[in-house]
Amino acid sequence: MNNLLGKLMQKSKIRMCMYEGCTSKGKSIIGAHALQENRLLNKLAVNNKVLMQDFNKEPEFLEIVPGKPEPFYFLREVKIKDATVATCFCNTHDNDLFEKIEKSQYSLDTLDAEQQFLFAYKTLSFELYTEIAARKYHINVFKNIPQVMKNRHVVHQYRINALKLEDLQYYNDYFNKALREKDYTGLETVVLEIPFRVQFANYMTVAPPFDLHGKKIKNIDKKSKRMRFVFFTTFPVENKSYILVSALKSDMSIYGEYFDQIRNAPLGLFQYYINTFIPLYSQNLIVSPALWSSWTEKAQGGVQYAVADPHSTKMLKGVQFYMQNVAKARKKDKDLIIDSSSIAFDFFIPYTPM
């Protein structure tokens, strides 16, 4: 069964250009990088390799509940030429659209509105492509193994995929219109600049379930029933790093307070939030082998479990309770120092040349 599912996953790969109206096919579709190989990923690589989840390889099956094996996709070494790659843009549009964030003649020392927009657009495009491929995979599974339609978990995943595709298309329409009109003013972005080079990167399109105070975020629009998304991109450059958090200005009624918290949070609190939120909520965490080797075996195990656990909702609930307790403590003492050392691993370790 696992072998058959693996073959169906390979058959579900799609070669398409996400740019509106592009009809390119075949060899003109390239393996585009969500994070550029020679400008960003090489800042993390050791021997041209980084660590990330590789969904092209078979998962490891573990029994958390005896008798019920479940798939776990752990972080593995991947060559940077293959990292964050998807066949979702043609050569022309990958070069022309993203030159201001990928070509060396354009600086990343300060990011203008167009560059901030392009990072968010690329994150959205890769997320949408993943969901399109997942839709094709579900259809292939139902066609070739119709008995799985009796599996409630599989059917639930299919429905979640269908809803997310519809929600993401709303954002894709916005980005397409903005690109046509070259209007980058509809996006709100918090640019967090870290004064040293971190040893990890990440991109994700998510609907955060709670804010930095542990308060639940009502991220579903009542009228349209649409999920409202936020776009995160984290990457190192030469002597510093960026965390970009973007959302549509039309969604600020939902995320305005959340963005203010990110702008004004104590460093320790934000570090704790990111250190736990990213591995629990993202499938696109890229870690430098240098950072990995600096952690203890316990820390490495913590990251692997956080990244791969198919039931991370329970762990997220624990993080939410922690944030709520910190918020209560800060109400009593505004000068409270937030200690993020309680977590076994820390992504915010400065880069040290080897």
Image (cartoon, grey):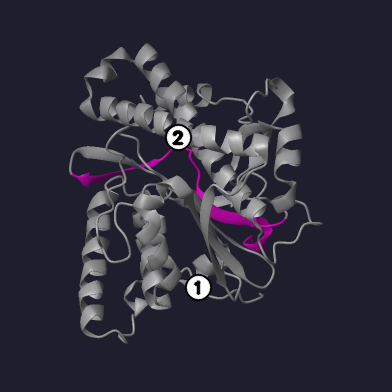
296 drawn magenta: no
Q: Residue 113 at x, y = what percent?
A: 63, 55
Instruction: Relative to 206, say whether 28 is above or below.
Output: above
Q: Nearer the viewer, residue 33 or 11?
A: 33
* Disc 2: which residue: 168
Contact? badges 2 and 1 (CB < 8 Å): no
Q: Of callouts 2 and 1, which one flags the residue occurring earlier in the amino acid sequence?
A: 2
Q: Which mark is residue 294?
A: 1
Element class at badge 2:
helix
Q: Residue 16 at x, y = what percent?
A: 62, 25
Image quarter hosting the N terminus: top left
Residue drawn where x is 26% and y is 57% of the image: 315
Instruction: Specify whether 99 is left or right of 122.
Output: right
Residue drawn where x is 59% and y is 34% of the image: 177
Q: Which mark is residue 276?
A: none
Residue drawn where x is 38% and y is 13% of the image: 144
Residue situated furthest left in the rendering = 66
Q: Residue 220 at x, y = what percent?
A: 30, 41
Q: What's the residue type where badge 2 is placed?
A: Leu
Q: Which residues are magenta?
A: 39-65
Residue at mark 2 to residue at mark 1: CA–CA distance: 37 Å
Judge the density around disc 2: few (<14), some (14-19), many (≥20) Cα neighbours within 10 Å: many
